[in-house]
Amino acid sequence: MNKKFVGLGLASVAVLALAACGNNSSSKSSEGSGKDSAVKFAMVTDTGGVDDKSFNQSAWEGISAWGEEKGLTEKTDYAYFQSDDESQYETNLESAASSGFNLIAGIGYKLTEGITTAAGRHADLNYVLVDSRLPEGDNVLSALFADHEGAYLAGIVAAKTSDSKKVGFVGGMESDVITRFETGFVEGVKSVDPSIQVEVQYADSYSDAAKGKSIAATMYASGIDVIYHASGATGTGVFQEAADINSQLPADSEDKVWVIGVDRDQTDEGKYTSKDGKEATSTLTSTIKQVGHVLQGIANDQLEGKEFPGGQVLTYGLKDGGVDLVMDGLSEDVLKAVEEAKAKIIDGSLTVDSGVESDKTAK
């Protein structure tokens, strides 16, 4: 099947959301509560779980906010099915279908096979596959994110913050998705200073906090002072190690180490109490992935009765607000550099390499 590659602006998503909210003439069959809701939305997590402080949590926050806004009932009209290991993907997808949900999202590329099977089995249901391209399926929408663009900005922040000129990247599992994060980050660092060393390590898990802590401990001990993680719940361990180090120092110590969060604002994950009794955070900034907002927009389209864009691949980047960077707390110098790079990426004068060959052939 020939795929149509398009970008869907979040500004349009927001307009659709407002339109859905403001349409008081909508009948209960299109925007009601409980059993009368025409759209019943479920998501199946990957192994990071719904409370991973990252990717899955962002998705669920978006879906639950959508359900609450529409006055719908959790578990009946919107719900999540948590996967504790990969063997549960297919079972959870089947449970979502048999429970009456007609719009089902698989959160993460690892659900590609499961979504393929489920979509083929239930041609009357619509599926959203996040972070992966499905080779076929008229009832499947593939939602990708230009994570490399946000990661590029994170690389600029890391390079301009590091005193040691050594920074680190901790990935969850090797995949096209994490390759985008890694490639964009390294490119952003090198755009500031090509001599800065970037150490890359993978934990081979999105749910192993102990492994994340161990990797971070080794990196910080080697002189690295900024780590960007793209590792789901494994990143919890990176924050824990940074807190352990920083809690032994005054809040304003020049020896403080930093973490750059991923997928959502992870300032809270970095909180700790310094040696001099002050509340502080090890979080330097975070890249944002608007999974929840995108899923809200898709659900609102369905509430309005629009045709489901099955068989398409939609990519969300900086230009349409699909990815971004938390700007709060950045110094004036760093903020200026980030804003300049962001503007260039948006206007097309700067193209960030994703490191993924299929991204190049899709354009």
Image: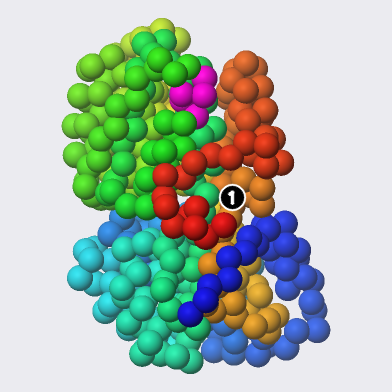
Rendering quarter of residue 203: top left
Residue 289 sits inside the magenta stretch: no
The type of colouring in the image is rainbow
Instruction: Tell me the residue at 53%/67% (across/down).
Output: 313
Residue nearer the viewer, 128 or 69 = 128
Q: Is residue 254 left or right of residue 172?
A: right
Q: Is residue 216 left or right of residue 310?
A: left
Instruction: Categorize mark 1 by other alpha carbons within 10 Å: few (<14), some (14-19), many (20+).
Output: many
Residue farthest along the front direction in this orientation:
361
- Whether residue 113 is visible to the viewer of this picture, yes or no, is yes
On the image, the x and y values in percent for residue 205 come to: 23, 49
The correct choice, above or below, for 149 with respect to 337 in the image is: below
Residue 190 sits inside the magenta stretch: yes
Examine the residues drawn in magenta and state their main secondary structure.
helix
Q: How many marks?
A: 1
For label 1, the residue is: 317
Q: Is residue 272 left or right of residue 39?
A: left
Q: Which residues are magenta?
A: 188-192
Quarter of the figure that contains the C terminus: bottom right
Rendering quarter of residue 96: bottom left
Instruction: Tell me the residue at 27%/49% (across/down).
Output: 173
Residue type at the position of mark 1: Gly
Rendering quarter of residue 310: bottom right
Label 1: which secondary element: loop
On the image, the x and y values in percent for residue 297 come to: 63, 67
On the image, the x and y values in percent for residue 295 come to: 55, 65
Instruction: Tell me the residue at 45%/90% (across/down).
Output: 123
- Whether residue 270 is visible to the viewer of this picture, yes or no, is no
On the image, the x and y values in percent for residue 178 come to: 37, 47
Instruction: Tell me the residue at 43%/66% (across/down).
Output: 133
The correct choice, above or below, for 274 with respect to 96 in the image is: above
The correct choice, above or below, for 294 with respect to 175 in the image is: below
